Every structure is written in C-alpha cells, then in structure tokens.
Image (cartoon, helix red, strand yellow):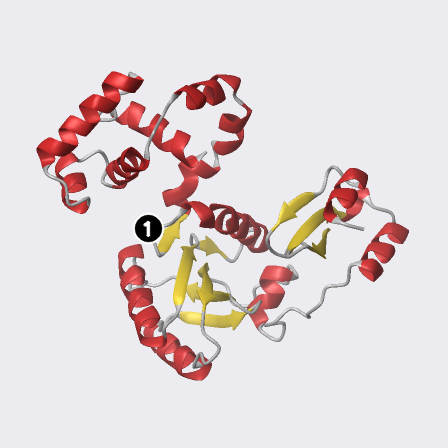
Amino acid sequence: MNKSQLLEIYPQAKIKKMQSSDSEVLSIPIDGEYLWLNKKELTDKEIQLLQVFFPNEKKQQGETHEWYGILFKHQAIKKEGVYRVIQIQLQKKDDFLLKEWQQNFQAMFPHMVDLFFFTEKDILLVEQQAATNFTLEELEGIFLTLDADFETSSKVFVGNFYSSQEPFAELFLEEQEIFQEELPFVKAQRVFAVANVALHYFTKTKMQASLLIQNFKKSLVIDQEMSDIIQTLWSNQGNISSTAKELFMHRNTLQYRLEKFQELSGLNVRNMDELILCYLLLLN
C-alpha cells in the first residue's frame, strides 16, 4: 500500500517530515515521510494492523534522557524553573567528530540541562533561563563557528522560555511543527525563532485558500532580481540604504528598480503594508 492509497482511506491524515511527539498520534513511516493519524479516530485493530504493516524502522534516539521523557512522553518536569528548547538540524559528513563537537558545544552553554540527538540529524538542547542566555545574534555567531570548525551545516530554531508549570510538551510540539514547516522558507538565516516566521506560518493557510490572493499572485510578475530585493528589503525593515548595501547595489539603482516595479504592479514596496503583501506572496 502506498501513500496515495492510505490518504484515500484516511483523508484526515497529515503528511509530516518527522514522527509526532504526541502519544495520541500514530506516525506511519512511508516514502521518507510520516502520516500522522489521530488514534482516537482509529480502532484498536486498525492501530495494530498499521503498526504491523508500517513499522518504525528505528527506535528513537535519546530515549534515556530525562527531557526526552518530558518532551515526547509528557512526563512531569522534576525541577521547577523556566526553560527553552533549541532545535538543531545538523547536516554532517561521515567522518563527523561527534565527541569533540559535543565537548565544544557543552562548553559554550553553561545553562544547558540536557542535550541529545533524537534522530540521526535532529538535536534538542534544553536550556534553563538565566541572565546570560544567548540572544539570536549571539547564537548565530556560535553556530557559524561550529559549522566552520566541524564542516557541518546547521539550522537552528530557538524556542520561547516557558515555566515548568506550563503544558511544556504541547508547547514544544507546536514549536517543532513550526520549525519543520518553515525550514524550506528560511534560507538566509542559520538561527531563527517564532517571531521571525510567525507572519508566514500563521497566515499561509488563509492566503492559499483566498481566490483573491491567488488571482492577484497570478497577475503579478516578480523576477529573481525583484524577489531578492523584496526579501532583502523586508529583512532590513524597509530601509533602502541597508538593502542597497546588502545587495551590493547603488542606492539610485535600487530606487529605479522599485519605481519600475511600482509602474508594472501598482505596488509601492517602500510602503510597509505593500511590502508585507509582496513578501507574503513570495513565500506562499
């Protein structure tokens, strides 16, 4: 049975890049992805048969770690406090120096309470809140250095800090979904957080369902150069001088490109509202 056949039988299933950390969700490995099914919508017999025909090839890594149980099995947090989870996707070579990487990594994070791989390339760092936690900019520098030293490539999602009294596993699950869904759209940034992708993540379903937006998108012609300009202008909060500098373009040349785009599209991306619309159209 293939993915299409399963979706015909279970149209409510969701296609995801990873296993669910929710114990109420059955994750079925198929074609390099996972089909998520709510166990409440399945009979016990269906669950047993699906697990027999679609077994998970590998036991999850990291199961011996305390925070694996907290995040994936909804176990209680023993020590009260405020914590955040930093998700890391690490592309590495066959001769990757794991022990040396871990030693360097642990030396850089004095407030770390747990660190473990839960797949071959996915790592979770759990950190307790302190006055000296790293900012996104500082984390960008740290991972830039680690990637250079160990010939790796990292993508890092920095979660929010939550009290141990909060529903931590559920909050982590949502952050995990955001990280996986937004990874294809975050190209320039090595390190990002919810705030960096919230606009796209929380609007994309509405935009994809809007006939008006889809019709507008079809009529709007944006070449690669203009696409780069819009995305860079957005990352620089509409600042023309900073955008020109980042694109190695003369300010007057950039102004000319923006004016020509306004003539063709009717959109003035020097206006923040119209820039947001163009940015979202590019992402969606």
Estimate the x, y position of residue 15 in percent, counting from the top left: 65, 46
Residue at 47% in and 46% down: 182
- Quadrant housing residue 133: bottom left
For label 1, the crowd category at 10 Å Cα-Cα, with few meaning under 14, some 14 to 19 and many 20 or more, is few
Q: Residue furthest right?
A: 45
Estimate the x, y position of residue 165 in percent, counting from the top left: 53, 54
| The one of 115 and 1 positioned closer to us in this rendering | 1
Asked which secondary structure carries label 1, the reply is loop
- Quadrant housing residue 220: top left
The answer to whether residue 29 is above or below residue 126 is above
Residue 259 shown left or right of residue 120 in the figure: left
The answer to whether residue 69 is above or below residue 43 is below
Residue at 41% in and 42% down: 197
Residue at 34% in and 29% down: 222
The answer to whether residue 259 is above or below residue 173 is above
| The one of 207 and 158 positioned closer to us in this rendering | 207
Instruction: Tally the marks.
Output: 1
The answer to whether residue 13 is above or below residue 23 is above
Estimate the x, y position of residue 202 in percent, counting from the top left: 48, 35
| The one of 107 and 51 positioned closer to us in this rendering | 51
Estimate the x, y position of residue 247 in percent, counting from the top left: 19, 44
Mark 1 sits on what residue?
188
Residue 166 shown left or right of residue 191 in the figure: right
Residue at 48% in and 51% down: 179
Q: Amino acid at mark 1?
A: Ala
